[in-house]
Image (cartoon, helix red, strand yellow):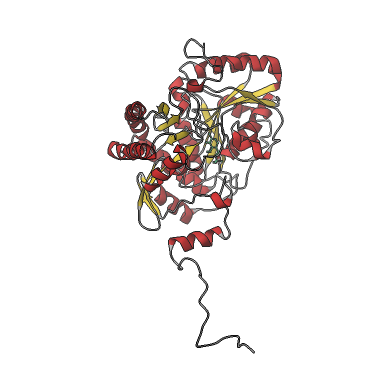
Amino acid sequence: MKPDFDPDHPPTPRPVGPPPGSPAHLERRQRAHVLYTWSAQQSARPVSITGGQGARFFDHEGHGWLDFESQVFNANLGHGENRITEAIATQARELACAHPAAVFEAKAALGEAIARVTPGDLDHVFLCLSGAEANENAYKIARLVTGRQKVIARRRSYHGATMGALSLTGDNRRWATEPGLWGVLRAEDPYCYRCPFGLEHPACGTRCATHIEHIIQMEGPESIAAIFLEGMTGTAGAFVPPPDYWKTVRAICDRYGILLVADEVLSGFGRTGRWFAVDHFDVVPDMIVMAKGITGGYAPLAAVAMRRAIAAHFEDSTLWCGLTGYAHPISCAAGVAAIRVYEDDGLIAHAAAMGAHLADRLAGLKAKHPLIGDARNLGLLGVLDFAAPGSRAPLIPYAAPTPPGSFLARLDAELRARRLHICRKWTQLFIAPPLVIDRATLDEGLDLIDAALTAAGDDS
Ligand SMILES: Cc1ncc(COP(=O)(O)O)c(C=O)c1O
């Protein structure tokens, strides 16, 4: 009988995978239990990160990456900001767990800080932990205040991944889990480069804003509670609204008693060179939804800021909204510290100045690379929008996967090879570095994009 084990001829050891402690081993351990978001697990593209400083972060092999996505448009204050981590540590030692109705210093200070930076009389806040949750609550508040049920949101928009926020969302992230909530009506976008009406501004009369009145009239004004608009559209396309867009929508809302909600989750806290994108247009919405930059990503925090009259509604009517993590002490402390950093370091004005430089550089890239159909930005939220040369046709159909071997696939690989962390979706490459970035580092990243575009070649 054949022995089970022959010491003179031991079996070849089976491969056991990456050595313990290696970056690949860590990824394997994590992947065994923790899912990646928004992707089939096999096609997920992990980001290796150990820490960072300013506009750079470091991977597990010690390489530096330039962060042109700010960790999902989040790390406005960059990496390694000690003033926030210290505030979090101090808060954690003093008070880390509190009832939603608790009274404590960081919570009061956060309310004051948000009221200081919001426009007009938006000086009351409802606090949450994510942008999606904040949109959910703004949605509920609009229905509670107006007694109306329907809302209007734009076709190319993103408002979060929970069911209500995803129902507001216009872009293709909504499709897989439909049907969502009833009563969301769709308006077209201020996407001037590929105008949904086939018009040109200003001859168009800003149809993307004025057509909203037609939707309202045809649906019954008394049934519509609110209009949800991203301050400046983020990941659904980075559209800079025409100068009269917001004022036109504000006037329509006022005519019909409809609340105007600005979702500034991505465009808020200096991203566009003002505290909020609506500040560029001199408009005061009824509510502003915020998250991400409110702590610069150092702790989960979001808020619905509302005008005094909306808050007053809940003096004697129940606010049917709440969560266990409401005003979490650590998140409040992070928010207070983050807002102080924006103020002390003049980061909003700095983002505006860097934005002006970015506009020049994007124009230069567009002049040089024939596949760039449009280059636009407001502050440090920019995009290169690719098109077939001589037309405005996107390189791939809306929401289509990236064809293997295509220009876009090659571009992704070239950017990654240069260790530029950046977001490309569909036919658009988004540029959104931390606001703390200096001009030389911004140029460094844009030079990497230039080189990657050249290396990726044409659209063949
Ligand atoms: C405009 C906008 N609203 C809402 C959200 C959802 O925020 P969160 O991912 O924190 O739920 C996002 C996220 O990217 C966003 O860009």
431 or 305, which is in the foreground? Answer: 431
Count up the numbered dots: 0
Where, by quadrant of the figure, is residue 272 drawn? top left
Q: Relative to residue 101, is residue 203 depicted above or below?
A: above
Q: Position of residue 130 (x, y in %)?
A: 56, 42
| Location of residue 59 in the rendering, given as x and y in whole percent from the top left corner | 40, 54
In this view, the residue in front, 419 or 99, is 419
Q: Quadrant of residue 177?
A: top right
Q: Residue at x 53, y 15 (%)?
A: 248
Against 420, residue 276 (above or below) is above
Instruction: Judge left or right: residue 285 versus residue 351.
Output: right
Q: In front here: 371 or 211?
A: 371
Q: Can you say whether 293 is above or below 225 in the image?
A: below
For the N terminus, give its image quadrant.
bottom right
Residue at screen point 56% across, 25% down? 286
Depth check: give the residue in front, 460 or 126. 460
The correct choice, above or below, for 150 with respect to 133 in the image is above
Q: Is residue 125 visible?
A: yes
At which x and y percent is residue 36?
Answer: 55, 51
Question: Horizontal placement of 388 versus 164: left or right?
Answer: left
Q: Quadrant of ligand 1?
A: top right
